[in-house]
Amino acid sequence: GDSVTQMEGPVTLSEEACLTINCTYTATGYPSLFWYVQYPGEGLQLLLKATKADDKGSNKGFEATYRKETTSFHLEKGSVQVSDSAVYFCAPMKTSYDKVIFGPGTSLSVIP
Amino acid sequence: NAGVTQTPKFRILKIGQSMTLQCTQDMNHNYMYWYRQDPGMGLKLIYYSVGAGITDKGEVPNGYNVSRSTTEDFPLRLELAAPSQTSVYFCASSWEREYEQFFGPGTRLTVL
């Protein structure tokens, strides 16, 4: 069945370090791909999305490129800030059932 | 716009009790969802709805019921609460299935 594998956390980085959170998925067809972020004590909110191969989603300095050949959607940021501390969820859309599959989440802590 | 609102924020139930978690959205979204998030885990879909009067099961529907009598409201009913239902519950909505999901702030439920 459809599934998503995310880099295990927690991840701890110093401010201004580079970030990559890996995400790979298995799905029938070509799903839309999402990254959601959950700040402490809050619900999830959309960070970025891509709807077709080679699309690049970007927001708040984060980027992710839809790689059809490797079924991946890795999240990257060149210089993280303390305010980026949160849990990040990779979420491909399960097109056959109108549902998004959320990965297990990767917890990121950025220290000054 | 208030977005997606959930009540209550916190609740403690005794085993065997019942309760309804309320969810309301004011964005005129067609799709609504209920998820549960267990500690350190991703989100699991409980039920979803593609419009008023239409509901369907997600991955973990046992022990729960939903209804969707209006576009705005999507209450989740727990009958005969069990300790395994201790979790954080999130309601979400979206315009269409491949659009961004908007999440409520969550309800933290403990069953003792």
Image: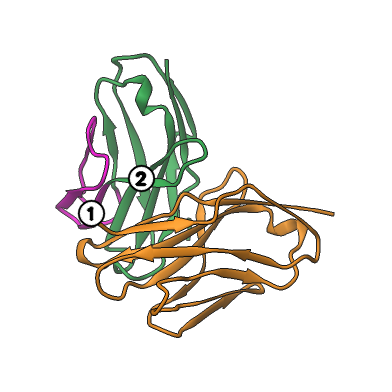
Chain colours: A orange, B green
The amino acid pointed to by label 2 is: Lys
Residue at mark 1 to residue at mark 2: CA–CA distance:
15 Å
Q: Secondary structure at mark 2?
A: strand
Disc 1 residue crowd, few under 14, some 14–19, many 20+, Cα 10 Å = many
Up/down of A94 relative to A55, above or below: above
Q: Residue at x 39, y 79 (%)?
A: A68
Q: How many marks?
A: 2
Residue range in magenta is: B47-73
Disc number placed over residue B49 in the picture, else none: 1
The amino acid pointed to by label 1 is: Ser
The first of marks 1 and 2 along the sequence is: 2
Q: Residue A52 lies in what quarter of the image?
A: bottom left
Q: Residue at x 22, y 33 (%)?
A: B62
Residue matched to label 2: B44
Magenta segment includes B67: yes
Q: Residue at x 36, y 25 (%)?
A: B84
Image coords of residue B81 (percent x, y): 31, 21
Q: Residue B100 lies in what quarter of the image?
A: bottom left
Up/down of A63 relative to B63, above or below: below
